[in-house]
Image (cartoon, rainbow, N blue to C red):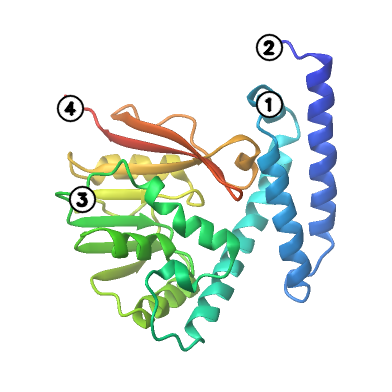
Amino acid sequence: MEISKSEIIKVKEIVKNLELYKDKLSNIDYIHQKKDFFSIMKKLRKYLLSVEDWKIFKTFYHSEYYKLYNDFFNNINQYYLRSLESIQSLSIMTKWIHNFNSFSDLLDRELIKDSFERKGKEIESLDFSKAKTLVLVWCGPLPETLIYIYENTNIKNIIWLDYNHEAIFMAWEMVSWLNLNNINFEQIDWTKYDYKDADIIILPLFCSPKDKIINRIVKTWKKSAQILVSNPKWLWHLIYEWIWSTNPRLRETYREDLYSNFIAQEIIKLEKYDF
């Protein structure tokens, strides 16, 4: 692939900016300087959204820098999201709120509120009419996807998986606080879970390793089940795992890009080939 001089200049500019963010994040105490840490992460995520040129991204992806920055920013972003969700959960549960129309009314963190209000668009391709059991991979301290589905669908049984005990504990506290029923949490490796009872399986942006999870699903799930996968777009690949291709036993039945001021992703629906 021939790379033009202008493309090289743009890639060097990306590397320069990422190095500045890497340097700032490498020299900050995440715990005692949390406000500053959150501010830097917010600016970083906004910058990653600003690069929307596929050709430039592809050039950067195949450069020597991608792997270096991917490892660094992906790990930090996971910590950032769990911290943000934990703070939002505690904020909600320490308030004495008698009446609210939607869970969205309780959210005061812009990124989380945007994520919750985007759920309807994310899951619109799913057929809930005959679904009884839904499995969500990666719980997190604030189970906003679970709560949105509970509020807006008639699904009877929701199972949320996570490997992190503290995240499950906090998510369970939130579910109990909201008095939600038919919710189950399991602390487990997603690549070893048995998906045989799932009618719908959702893999959000931040779950990984997506390829191994999907291979496990294909080995254990029922023929009629649906998988919904969120993939990052452009430079968001640096902070979320993406999957280039899926299991050959699956067919893609839906794909749509979804953007906001806080996210750039594509939603992919997968089903089994009907041989």
| Residue for badge 3 | 196
Q: Which mark sits nearer the N-terminus, 4 or 3?
A: 3
Helix, strand or loop at mark 2: loop
| Residue for badge 2 | 1
Are there few (<14), some (14-19), or many (20+) residues within 10 Å of tag 3?
some
- Can you say whether 44 is above or below 83 in the image? above
Quadrant of the snapshot with the C terminus: top left
| Residue for badge 1 | 62
- Amino acid, disc 2: Met
Residue 26 appears in which quarter of the rendering?
bottom right
- Amino acid, disc 1: His
Helix, strand or loop at mark 4: loop
- Amino acid, disc 3: Lys
| CB contact under 8 Å: marks 1 and 2 | yes
Q: Which mark sits nearer the N-terminus, 1 or 3?
A: 1
Are there few (<14), some (14-19), or many (20+) residues within 10 Å of tag 2?
few
Distance Cα–Cα, label 4 vs label 3: 17 Å
Are there few (<14), some (14-19), or many (20+) residues within 10 Å of tag 1?
few
- Amino acid, disc 4: Asp
- Can you say whether 263 is above or below 60 in the image? below
